[in-house]
Each structure stands twice: as structure tokens, then as C-alpha cells.
Amino acid sequence: MAGEIVDGFIQAIQLIMTGNPEVMRITLLSLEISLAATFLSALISIPAGALLYYHEFFGKRVLVNILQTLYALPTVLAGLLLFLLISHQGPLGFLSLLYTPYGMVIAQMILVLPLITGLTFSTLNGTDPAIRSTVLSLGATKLQSMGTLILETRFGILAAVILGFGRAISEVGAAMIIGGNIRGYTRVLTTAISLETSIGDFALAIALGIILLGVAVLVNIVLNLVQSGSVLKNTWTS
Amino acid sequence: MNVIEAEGLTKRYGEREILREISLSVPAGRIFGLIGPSGAGKSTLLRLLDLLEAPTGGRLSILGEDALPMSSRFQLRRRMGMLHQKPVIFNRTVHENIAIGLKYRHESRDRIESRVRDALREIDLPGYSPRPARTLSGGEAQRVALARALVTDPEILFLDEPTANLDPPSAENLEEIILRLNREKGMTIVMSTHDMLQGQRLAGSIGVLMGGRLTQVGNSLEIFQRPASKDIARFVRVENILNGLVTENIAGEVIVDVSGKIFRAVAPLQPGERVNLLFRAEDVTIDLAGGMKSSARNVFPGKIKRLVTLRPVVQVVIDCGIEITALVTASSAEDLGLSEGKEVRVSVKATAIHVLPET
């Protein structure tokens, strides 16, 4: 067993170094799907988080609590839920999204939307209320005011988006159920690792694992930089 | 024309009443000072007048328009400006900070450029345009915030304790700018301050806000010499507040008995009324016992109990049976050789005493 792992590692490094087409294809598809899911979620979630911050309504606290609970929504559950909706017998079956990358994007969005919305809200909510009234006194419309506030809290909100991407790229449950792990079409890093492990092709599994870990490390580094604000602050002001 | 006209303005947060029945009018071109202890509701009142918050009750008209309907508030707000004690500086360049109000108003790029350039010159920070605004010092940040509020040419400018966080030279600089805006552009300015001297220096009229009520409105002489209540007197630091009983009224001059000491003052009050006598320490003169006869009506011999040097003046507390506080210049204190235990004579003019019926 120990030998197999060592061999697996050596082969995995070779696969990555030589730019194995299968590895590359899986990695690229993974990035495409998760980046798309994160980007689309951010487009919806940032304004949604801002709206939540700007409006007081009955049940707001409950809604925020629900969002925060959904941060930890099990990915297989999201997958199951979406499966029931878009499977051929489901109410949205006519869209033929099951076992497509589009379906996977939607599945990951279900996981990421609450996260970015909730964290955007918390970030805005944590700002000095004086910012909001200063913006108002300077004559901003509601929309202008939201824009200024989001720009002011851009580091916090960007951190939320990065966390969302981290959740999307690393999840396996929904990708498996909705994507179906079809080679060259819906096979992504996590589902491929799962499959290769079960059929005993450790070299490929380890190679993909290393890449996934690399992405996670990269996300973490970027997140740290954003939170310390160093990189972006300097490019912003220079 | 009154640019601000408030009637019975009330603000409550839940059960807590912050402002109660505020009625106030500010004519165009006036500097109106709002003084009062912290927590009196000064900031809240400014926020109501700048239309950042809606009152719970009452009526408010700004620049001749009813300022309560939502439909008019936004446009009216764009005709006013506000500067806070600790201004919010956006995490962008100085230029972007100053330009933001103009951008909200969709001004042309050329106009924004020229307005920002002029503004930077006016606040004496030329060349600061590309700097990250968060790196500015407190005084610089305050000036940038002022420029930001001014580039949109507000008709009314609200200043919430504008110099509270500034060092004396920066504060003086800001005061000059405020006076200039008022004189040259005729801008109406409403400012809160807890610095009463600043209130006197700048404001044409002053309102005293205590416990959420506007307890007195007047010019600085009225507020400082003739406060409308004992609380206001304490707040504007009237050092001598004595309690007595009116014993006689001779043609408008009342005789008041304060623990056996007889004071003469001017007031339309009848014998038997309990009153407070208020007079400022600077209206009390000291001379040496046995000196020339004073022309003042109220003269009392006493012994110096305490001397507090607050250059360039000295505060002297004299025990005349009752305690009276006087304020003399350090040099005259020296000339008179004032020291603790020394016998002196204090005098107060009858007209310098403000008589307030006890409530």
C-alpha cells in the first residue's frame, strides 16, 4: 500500500508536469464551472446583501439567520433538491439541465448565493452607520448610496466572493448528482477524484487532488491578501 | 425669510424621547449656534434639520418648502450640506472624496475637475488630489470633508461640533473659513458646539438645548448674561448663583436678602418671591479693604479663600459670609497683591445681576 501511494505520487507529478490532457481538461472545466457559479452568484448576492442592509422589514432577522444556516447546507442536499426540480419528471425538467455543466453551475450557485449574500450583509452591517448618513447628506440616491457603500467595503465583499469560490470548487455532492461525472463533459476535479479513487487509479486521483489543494491554497493566499488589504489597496491608490 | 422653520419637532426612538417640542426659526444668512451638554440632542436635531432622519412629530419647513413629505426631502437634501465632528473619509483619493457629491448630481467631468481644483485651493491643500484620503491628518481630513460638503454650493450648511477633534490652529483655521463662507456667500450656517466661546465668536444667535428641549434662544449676550434658567446658567458657567428672597421693590430696583447679605438688582418682582441671583465672575471687581469708595451698589467685605491661576486671568473665591467668585487679570491680581487669607472688598453692579424667579 505504501509503495502504491509513493508510486501514485510520482506518477501524479509526472501527469501534472507533462500537462496530461485529461488532467488539464478536468481542471479547466472545474475552474470554468465554479468561476461561472461564483461570478453569477456575486452579481445577484452583492446587490441582494445591500438591499437587505438598506431595508427594514418584518422577518429580516429570521431571513438573515436562514442565510447563515445555509452557509453549511450539505452539498448533497443541494444536489438532491435541484435534482428533484430538473430531473425529467421534475417541474423544470423541460429545461434539460440535468447532467449538463449548466445544471452544475446552478447547483453551485445554490451553495454560494446564501454565503455571499449573508457575508455582504454582515460586512455592510458592520460598517460605521455614519458612512451611510454621510453618503445621504452628500445627496446620493438610494442606488448611488448602495454603490458607494459597496465600494467602501470592497475588501470585505471580495473576501466573501472568494470564500464562495472556495465552497464551489471544493464541493463534490451536488456536482456528482447534477453533473453525473460524464467524462469530458461534466467531470470536475472533485467528482474525478472520487471516481478514480473508487476504481483504484490513485495516480490520477492524487494528481487531481494536488491541483485541487493548490487551488485551495491559492484561494487562501488571495483571501489573506485581500483581508490585509495590502495588494489591492496599493493598486487602488497608486 | 426663514430658511429653517421648525414647530413642535419631536424625535423618539422607541420609548426614549430625544427631542421634545422644538420650535425654531433661522433666517437666511444667519450663523445659528446650538449649545448644550453632550447627550442633549444636538446631533439628532441637526440630523432632523438636514433631513437625514424624519421627526416623530411636529412640522418642518426648509428653504420655504414643507420638508416632511418624502417627495421633497431628497431634492431639499441636495441643497444642504453637513460636516460631522469626526468626518467619514472614503477609502479613495482626496479627489474622489471631494468630487463624490458632484458625481451624485451627474455634473460634467470638466465642471467636476474645476470645482475640485478650486476647492483644494480654498482649503489650502493644492496638489493633494491623488493622495489616498485615509492617510490625511485629522485637520486635513476635516478640511477635505468641508470641501466635499461645499463643492455642491449648499444653501444651508450644518456643522456638528466641527472643531471638537482639532488642534487649536486647525480649529481657528476652520472658524475663519466658516465666517468667510457666511460673510462672502451669505451661507446660512447651523452649528452645534460645546465650546461656548466658539458659540459667542461665531454665532449671531444661539439656542440652548438641554435634555431634548430648546430652553433658550437669543444672542450671545442674552444667553451668557441673562440665562433663562439655573441649569442654563450652570451650563454657560455663570460662577455666581445665589439663592435669596425679595424683601422690597423700589421703582424697579429689588432688594434681595441672601443669607443676611443685602443685594440690589433690577427686576420687576414683588417682595416675598424666592429668586436666584446670577452674575458672572468677570462682573465682580475686587479692591483692597479700606480703599476708595466704590460706586457699585453691592459691596461686601470678605477674605480670599482660594486663588486659581488660569493665565491670563486669576479666579478668586472670596468668603463674604457667602462665597463670591471673581475673575481678575493676572497682572491686576499681582498689583493688588492678592493672596489667600487677604482681606478684600468685592463689588457687583446692580445692573450686572440677573434675577431669576425660583421655579
Image (cartoon, coloured by chain):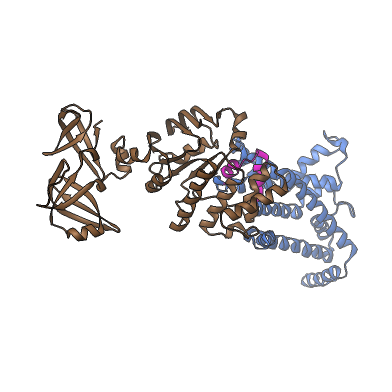
Chain colours: A blue, B brown
Quarter of the rendering occupied by the C terminus of chain A: bottom right
Say above or below: B297 vs B267: below
Closer-to-camera residue (A101/B27): B27
Asked if one can make out residue B13 in the rendered structure from this viewpoint, the answer is: no
Residue sitting at the far left: B290
Where residue A225 appears, x then y in whole percent? 66, 62
| Numbered marks: total | 0
Which residue is depicted at the point 85% across and 54% down?
A187
> For this view, does A10 lie left or right of residue B237?
right
The one nearer the camera, A207 or B37, is B37
Judge whether residue A126 is colored magenta. no
Tell me the residue at 82%/70% (across/down).
Answer: A13
Q: Nearer the viewer, residue A233 or A1?
A: A233
- Percent position of residue A52, x then y: 64, 39
Image quadrant where residue A51 sits: top right
- In the image shown, does B355 or A44 lie closer to the viewer? B355
Quadrant of the image containing the N terminus of chain A: bottom right
Point 22% across, 36% down: residue: B276
- In the image: residue A51, left or right of residue A17: left
Q: In the rendering, at what x and y percent does residue A124 appear?
A: 61, 46
Q: Image check: B107 left or right of B35?
A: right
Residue B3 screen position, x and y as percent? 52, 33
Among the 4 quarters of the image, the one containing residue A107:
top right
Q: Which residues are magenta?
A: A131-152
Q: Quick check: is A149 in the magenta stretch?
A: yes
Up-down: is A232 above or below B242? below
* Magenta part, dominant SS: helix
Residue at screen point 55% across, 32% down: B63
